[in-house]
Amino acid sequence: MKKLANFILFVIISLFLLHCTGKKVEKHEPVANNALYTRDAAMHVYASQPERALLIIDSAVIVGNLTPLRADILRAIVYSRSYEDMKYDSAILISERLMHHDSVKLNADMQIEVLEVLLNACRLKKDNEQAMYWATQLGDLYRRQGDVTEALRTDAEIGYFLIRIGQYDEGLATIDTVIYQLNGKRKFNELDASIIALKRKAEICSEISLYDKMISAAQRMLDLLGDYEKHPVDYHDGSIREPADEERPRYIDFYRGKAYAYMAEANASLGNHKAAKEYIALYENTSAGQGLTGRFMIAPMYGKLGDYDLMLDIYDEVEQQIGTDTINAYYVEVLRGRAEAAEAKGRDTEAKNYWKRYAELREMLNDQLLKSKAHLYAARFHAQEQQREIERNHEAIRRANMMGAVISIVSLIVLLFAVFVVIDLRSTKKRNRILAFQITEASKYKEKYRELKPTEKIKPNDDDYADMSDSELFAYLRDVIECENLYLNPDFERQALTNRTGLSKERIAAAFAQGSEHETLGNFVRELRLEHAIRLMNENPGQSIEQVSQASGFAKADTFARYFKMKYGMTPTAYLHTKA
């Protein structure tokens, strides 16, 4: 039974661990690797066709080209690059949920992807406090990964957000520290990080009217780009951000155009009109300055230079492209520029009208921003409620699965126990048959041995035992007990031999202890009674255990059964059944 208990315990532990840690194997049917529905296909169109990109992502999950987790990351990227506040909210909600996903927690690269989405979405929403929070986490993660350059790039973003929330000195000091630490490192990754940090500094200096520092940052951008253009091989590092040879001129032209625009704005603001016009001309020769978006960015500078007609021409083009969609930040700038131009030309009524529309639109956009935040908080609360509901359902499913597992384990234990009992019964029966056969054969052998053994005639009047050894005395006493069937008397004991032979109890005890293998008279008598019981059960199997016990000299049937089991390894009842 001990082996059975150990076996059942092993089965329980094994099944429990299998249920708790085992993963369900899901059968996936093979699907065609349709190139229309892949990550690359979605990312190729997401900037120009975000809705199509989302459809491609959904389809890629259906055909098995994307996991649900990777699809969520891509959806967040698409939403974060949109120009609609509500979609920024979606990007933030998806990304916040992903940050709690076990797979993302265990994968630093995935965490970086998600944090970059959060940072970009919060930046575009102008939620500077939240953007700084995610930027700090991203920078810490880069440092833990040992990527110092990316950590510095993120520090520049943190400096940018610090200035946006009013901590000007700390923010500028942070950006300047980044620029200083990247200085002199002629590798493309460090160059690109320096360009981004200088770009952020120029943009912030424009907002807080630090035009001298803006010029310094823009000039440093131009110097770096010029050196990179002359010595591209020296900057080659194989980093993921490094453009291919054919893309390098476009990279340089883009950021050079940004630097020219900063130089033009700063000089125009400082009253250096000649220098401003020179940089505007340089800017217009870059690819960025030739498009409507680039010209729109430079349009306010024409106003500062007094060329209002050119500024208004650009705004006319912008309005034609915007059409009826005038509830946006672009149209705010158009209204402001038209108000300034009307004031400069002395058209006060027209200027007043534009300023009024400008103020109303700004207020409307601010209200939309607040509504967007309210929508985000409401959506976040709803998402939390949904998550709690999902967790409740998962807990109910877990309990049901656990109950099912317990029932299965109990059923299996019962089945195993039943099998074990059947096997044990069969084994016991087989063992008992063998034992019964051996017991019977041993009894027959002893009977034959007694028949063949020469008997010595007992001399009842011979009391002279002084010269007998212990073994000789034992043989004499054995013959007396066996021949006269003294052992069949339940009350037979050493005193009866003393009365019968005149020997002392000590002499009789020594004969059995020293002259036999039985040690005591009681052991010898018990052996004779058990052998007699075997003969009775073989000769008359119909007798009860009680009858056999009494006929063999045992006072109680329980005592008989206990000694029988100790000697033969089975109960007298089992012996009788086996014989039957």
Image (tube, grey):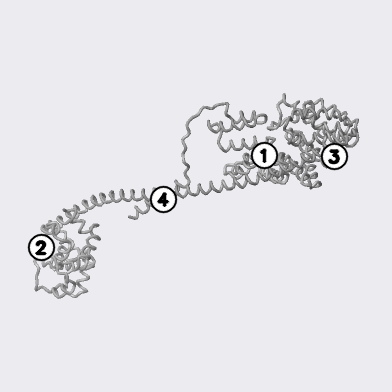
Disc 2 residue type? Thr
1 or 3: mark nearer the eye = 1
- Identify the mark at residue 406; answer none if there is no mark: 4
Q: Is residue 511 above or below residue 22?
A: below
Separation (CA) of disc 4 from disc 2:
71 Å
Asked whether the residues under the numbered discs 1 and 4 touch, taking CB atoms below 8 Å apart as contact, a structural biologist would say no
Residue type at the position of mark 4 = Val
**For the residues marked 1 and 3, what is the alpha-carbon distance in whole angstroms?**
32 Å
Determine the image quadrant of residue 248: top right
Q: Earlier in the sequence, mark 3 or mark 4?
A: 3
Q: Tell me, for residue 88, which label it has, or none.
A: 1
What residue lies at 68% left-to-right and 35% top-to-bottom?
82
Reading the image, the residue beneath label 2 is 455
Q: Position of residue 426 (x, y in %)?
A: 25, 49
Q: Nearer the viewer, mark 1 or mark 2?
A: 1
Q: Residue 93 or 252: which is nearer the viewer?
A: 93
User: Can residue 252 be seen by looking at this rendering?
Assistant: no
Q: Amino acid at mark 3?
A: Lys
Q: How many marks?
A: 4
The kind of secondary structure element at disc 2 is loop
User: How many residues crowd around disc 4 within 10 Å: few (fewer than 14), some, or many (20 or more)?
Assistant: some
Bin the neighbour count of mark 3 within 10 Å (Cα to Cα): few under 14, some 14-19, many 20 and up.
some
Say which residue label 3 marks.
Answer: 213
Which is nearer the N-term, disc 1 or disc 3?
1
Q: Give the SS element for disc 3.
A: helix
